[in-house]
Amino acid sequence: MILAVGLQLCIQRVKGLSGALDDFRNVCTIYSPKYAEKTFKCLKDFNRGVALFTCPKTPIKCLSASLKICFIAEDYFRRNDKACEAEILYCSGLRKIFPVEVYEKTILKVIKHPIRYAARHTSDELRRSSADLQGIMHVTPPMSCAEVLRTCKELSNKYGYADVNLQTLQHKMYPNIFGLGDCTPGITNKTSSAVGAQSQIVYQNVLSIFRGKYPIAHYDGYTACPVVTGYGTCILTEFDYNNKPCESFPWKQNSESRLNYFLKRNVLGKLYWRYNVKGKSNFNRNLLKMFKFRR
Ligand SMILES: Cc1cc2nc3c(=O)[nH]c(=O)nc-3n(C[C@H](O)[C@H](O)[C@H](O)COP(=O)(O)OP(=O)(O)OC[C@H]3O[C@@H](n4cnc5c(N)ncnc54)[C@H](O)[C@@H]3O)c2cc1C
């Protein structure tokens, strides 16, 4: 059995958020398909005031997405002559804006007027008065492992994630059970790139089990995410369990560049649909190795 039930949004954990997303014209989130389109409408309708972007302290899907939307909004306001009317605030419940030091430094440099950043700030409640103000609020809701796994004490750890070995992804109690994706513990940035890397490990280890052998393939925590910093620029992050960068390409991924953006916009999406979702993500890595890139 392979556990791959992902994370769930805990919108109800922020008092008033559920109603606000439905009823207030200026509260949105890209994290739910239901409100993703509303987000662009909010950006278009924004004229002046505070644009508040939040990030909770719980683990979330793609940490960078909460940042990307803030950077994209700032660029959108600038291109549409709304920037000088905007006060943009990125409030994160986390101690650091990004878990990997080198990327953190670059991201902090990207944050400049009119964006301000506050660490260790979360909102537990959304009051009518705050949403009535001019401006917009983009909320990244708190998340937890999917209910079905979280409530199954036999299969989950004390935090509700699949209780698997971080390297082999095999369940600690049941050798015929594996974990895959966002519902596994340890990954510092839960992404589909991580799922792609993990799926090869799970595949090899499941075959080993079928053959009566021990699972020996090890996942190193590889995760990757493009941090889009505007329309045309991007930082390409790739790192492992130890928050050590493990970059694939021979150019400087850790700086805002058009090349990173080109790759994100024109190449990664195609690779994702063609290979990742079909379980062939090793193709990407083998291709990079063929060109003697680093991974
Ligand atoms: C806005 C946003 C931007 C992102 N950007 C990137 C990016 O640029 N790059 C990147 O690599 N990743 C990105 N991600 C992250 C990526 O989408 C996730 O990490 C990935 O989808 C995780 O895959 P998963 O299969 O583990 O979980 P999911 O994709 O969440 O799939 C889990 C599935 O299990 C189902 N499920 C849950 N409970 C049950 C049950 N009881 N019975 C049956 N089915 C159940 C769920 O309905 C769901 O379909 C982004 C995510 C978001 C939200």
Image: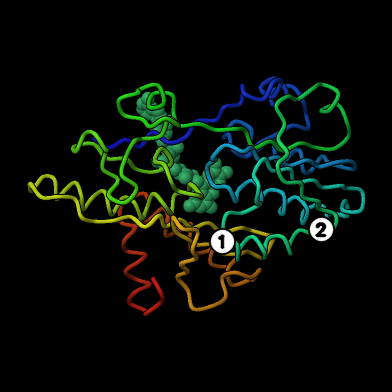
Local secondary structure at mark 2: helix
Local secondary structure at mark 1: helix
Query: Mark 1–mark 2 contact, CB under 8 Å?
Result: no
Q: Quadrant of residue 251?
A: bottom right
Tell me the residue at 69%/21% (across/down): 15
Q: Name the N-terminal-most of marks 1 and 2.
A: 2
Q: Is residue 93 above or below residue 106?
A: above
Tell me the residue at 77%/53% (across/down): 76
- For label 2, the crowd category at 10 Å Cα-Cα, with few meaning under 14, some 14 to 19 and many 20 or more, is few
Residue 97 falls left or right of residue 208 = right
Q: Residue 173, image x and y in percent? A: 24, 34
Label 2 sits on residue: 79
User: Which quadrant does the N terminus fall into?
Assistant: top left
Q: Is residue 243 above or below residue 178?
A: below
Tell me the residue at 31%/50% (across/down): 199
Q: Amino acid at mark 1?
A: Arg
Q: Residue 50, image x and y in percent? A: 85, 41
Residue 50 falls left or right of residue 39 = right
- For label 1, the crowd category at 10 Å Cα-Cα, with few meaning under 14, some 14 to 19 and many 20 or more, is some
Q: Residue 56, image x and y in percent? A: 64, 37
Q: Quadrant of residue 232?
A: bottom right
Q: Nearer the viewer, residue 140 or 56?
A: 56
Ligand 1 within 8 A of label 2's CB? no
Ligand 1 within 8 A of label 1's CB? no
Label 1 sits on residue: 265
Q: Is residue 49 above or below residue 283?
A: above
Q: Amino acid at mark 2?
A: Arg
Tell me the residue at 35%/23% (across/down): 153
Q: Quadrant of residue 171?
A: top left
Give the spatial CA distance, label 1 vs label 2: 19 Å
